[in-house]
Amino acid sequence: MADAIGGQGTNTGDELRLLIERAERLEEEKKGIADDIRDVMAEAKARGFDTKAIRTILKIRKKKKEEYQEEEAILETYMAALGMI
């Protein structure tokens, strides 16, 4: 009964194995996508673009317009309080 998890038999063990294998495949896909993004950033840099600015734009585009505007307003308020603007 070494394959049993909680005494439920091999079906549970097989199910767990399948879930783990699926997760492993997804991790590999995620690594591949991360490599692709790195390649895009390298290409952008080679063409003279600022990759830090591109990454910032990507973060902004993920947010709702109102959420971004609120964050910008708070940032501006704090910077003004510190005499930075």
Image (cartoon, rainbow, N blue to C red):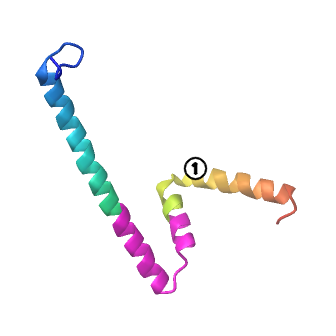
Task: Read off the magenta span.
Answer: 34-57
- In the visual, does 14 lie left or right of 47? left
Q: Residue at x 86, y 55 (%)?
A: 81
> Percent x, y for residue 6?
24, 14
Q: State which quarter of the image contains the N terminus.
A: top left
Q: Residue at x 52, y 74 (%)?
A: 51
> Percent x, y for residue 34?
37, 62
Q: State which quarter of the image contains the C terminus.
A: bottom right
Front position in the image: 37 or 2: 2
Q: For residue 56: magenta? A: yes
Residue type at the position of mark 1: Glu
Rendered view: 7 above or below 42: above
Residue position for label 1: 67
Rendered view: 53 above or below 10: below
Q: Residue at x 57, y 51 (%)?
A: 66
Mark 1, residues whose alpha carbon is within 10 Å: few (<14), some, or many (≥20)? few
Rendered view: 13 above or below 60: above
For label 1, the SS is helix
- Quadrant of the image occupied by residue 4: top left
> Percent x, y for residue 65?
54, 55
Q: For residue 16: magenta? A: no
Extreme residue in the front direction: 2
Secondary structure mostly taken by the magenta-highlighted segment of the chain: helix
> Percent x, y for residue 22?
21, 43
Q: Residue at x 57, y 71 (%)?
A: 53
- In the visual, does 7 lie left or right of 56? left
